[in-house]
Amino acid sequence: MRLAKVTLIWAALAAAIGVPIAAAAVSPLLAWRDWVYILASFAGIVALSLVLVQPLLIGGYLPGLSAYRGRRTHHWIGGALVMAVVIHVGGLWITSPPDMIDALLFSSPTPFSPWGVVAMWAIFTVAMVAALRRRLGLRARTWRIVHMPLAIVIVVGGAVHAILIEGTMETVSKAVLCALVLAATAKVMVDLRVWRRRKTLRGESVARQ
């Protein structure tokens, strides 16, 4: 791959992540918030950004990373995603415990809360199953069956959660980031399914011979 193309891909990813963070950093809404709320808000933005990186890694779309390094980085980013969500939820809990209790009990009047809570539990579930995968004896096929639906829940829930919130993030850059998250996830799922189908057909062809 040419250097110009490699540079363009990494620059596009940096812009997709950096622009929403930079726009949120100059939001006038931060002037009336304490540092805990600000930390929690930016942890949420970072979490959404990491959700964009995950399918790019597993699909091998980021140049300069081998398949092995891509998978390893995917695992580490997953851990960072969990930490970002914990900071996001923990900070909001410190800022307003009643609101967080309502959200966790699905009794909050805000429409974005249930989407975020469902995505959060899906993230925790994936992390827990991944950590216990060897002890549970999960094969690669079983792990995909568990992981893929939960990944869809994380992506859709996280994107809708972010879109419905009228807060720190700037509207246009937030919408673009969410659209990229959905598009990247859809592409990697289609590509991996096609690759596995070709592999299966190739194996059946060899067996017939």
Image: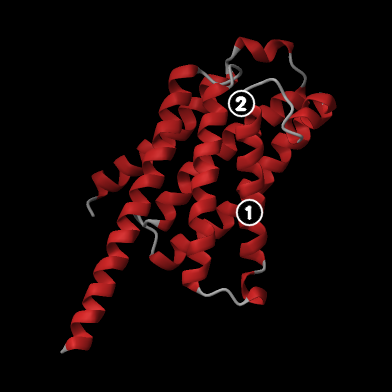
Q: Where is residue 7 in the image (x, y as percent from the top left)?
A: 32, 43
- Nearest to the eye among marks 1 and 2: give it: 2
Category of crowding for the residue at label 1, using alpha-carbon neighbours closer than 10 angstroms: few (below 14), some (14–19), many (at least 20):
some
Q: Which residue is drawn at 40% across and 50% down?
A: 56
SS for tag 1?
helix
Spatial CA distance of label 1 from label 2 is: 24 Å
Rendered residue at 47%/46% (across/down) = 53
Can residue 72 be spotted in the picture? Answer: no
Q: Which amino acid does label 1 sit on?
A: Gly
Q: What residue type is labelled 2?
A: Phe
Which quadrant: the C terminus?
bottom left
Most extreme residue toward the bottom is 209
Give the residue at x 33% y 48%. Answer: 187
Residue 153 image position (x, y, % from top left): 53, 44
Q: Earlier in the sequence, mark 1 or mark 2?
A: 1
Counting the numbered discs, the total is: 2
Which residue lies under the disc numbered 2? 112
